[in-house]
Amino acid sequence: MRVLMISDVYFPRVTGVSTSIQTFAREFGAKGHEVTLIAPDYGSSDYDASANESFEIIRIPSRYLPIDPEDRILQPFKIRRLTDTLKGRGFDLLHIQTPFIAHYSGLGLAKRLELPVVESYHTFFEQYLHHYVPWVPARWMHGAARHFSTSQCNGVDALVVPSQAMLDVLRDYGIQTAAEVIPTGIDLDQFSQGDGQRFRARHDIPPERPVLVLVSRLAFEKNIEFILRALVRIKAEVPDVLLVIAGEGPAQRDLERLAEQLGLADNTRFLGYLNRDGSLEDCYRAGTAFLFASRTETQGLVLLEAMALGVPVVSTAVMGTKEVLGEGQGALIAEEDEVDFAGKAVRLLKDPTLRKRLAREAVEHAHDWSAPVLADRLLKFYERVIDQARISIR
């Protein structure tokens, strides 16, 4: 099978969408299929050469997005110019990964290439968009996001949704497009290795210091403020606790200021993005526990990555994270309440027997989310969409 993908984001821009694209594309290649990805050029001349991907990436010139300088806006006319080049390549299907320029340019490209279109709904925009347009009333943005999503989802042949919770939301919007719940899997080989002591030595963290880890884009919808406020209560019980935060994003300065205001300057370490070359895996393994409290996740890949490495989780369970997590599966599920959340984190920090049990359960649970199994599910879904498109043509 030859799959054409298009996305408004991809590495070196670190997001769950980038990870999902890379994971599926690599697995498809390992199974003998071909993938071509159309993605923005971020001006990083050394990235593609160092990535050593097994699939083709066509970089499109792009410009800055004013409300989110991490992202780029694809140039649609550059995508249109690819039509003749791609026409003879024998693609079977086009998979749109994001709902911005990639969506509209992808639909046009699919029409010109006469391909069926699958789109992934990665992001819960109703709970996300108003953070980036704060001068517009939130209820207006909620309505706009619902309308935006409904229009786009009804314009494609099929949808891939990473969790049943997200699919339920789309059905409540009135979207009837054929859809399949297919989460992104994890590379268990990659996330079975990691050296926490190496990470501690690299960052001058004493071997005996209790460390909590958070890996996330530092965005307002990730609810990291809540974790910092809970950390105040954790510190009261475990004074030398350190929260290591790996990630970057538009909320970083606000979060750093809040940590200062809460008296957590010595108990937090903002590290920026860490590469998946062992650095990120080492970071996870340095943690006594992994913390998470996002309200908007359609899946929550970082939870699975932490668990695959044997790191117990303390997290709220909302939207997609509810389907990833379960009591007795490597996690303590907390309410979005500072007392409850902090209490569960302290319990893990102070109870080595509990940590050991949850670490074992976490590894076992993560194996249910292996990338090859979930890639097979997506390929079978592609086949059904392609078959249906052929029937429609007849």
Image: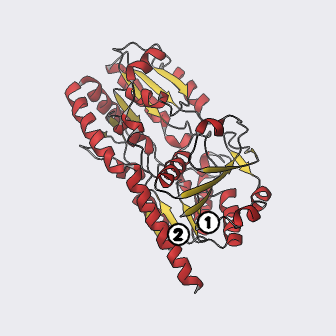
Residue 36 position in % (x across, y down): 62, 55
Badge 2 marks a residue whose secondary structure is: strand
Q: Which mark is residue 253?
A: none
User: Marks 2 and 1: in contact by CB < 8 Å?
Assistant: no
Instruction: Specify whether 131 is left or right of 77.
Output: left
Residue at image point 51% right, 49% down: 26
> For this rendering, which residue is in front, 381 or 357?
381
Q: Which mark is residue 158?
A: 2
> For this rendering, which residue is in front, 146 or 185?
185
Amino acid under disc 1:
Phe
Which image quarter: residue 140?
bottom right
Q: CA distance from mark 1 to mark 2?
A: 17 Å
Residue 108 position in % (x across, y down): 71, 67
Amino acid under disc 2:
Ala
Residue at image point 47% right, 72% down: 384
Residue at image point 23% right, 43% down: 328
Q: Which mark is residue 91?
A: 1
Residue at image point 44% right, 40% down: 302
Residue 13 position in % (x across, y down): 62, 40
Look at the image and tell me in which quarter the C terminus lies.
Answer: bottom right
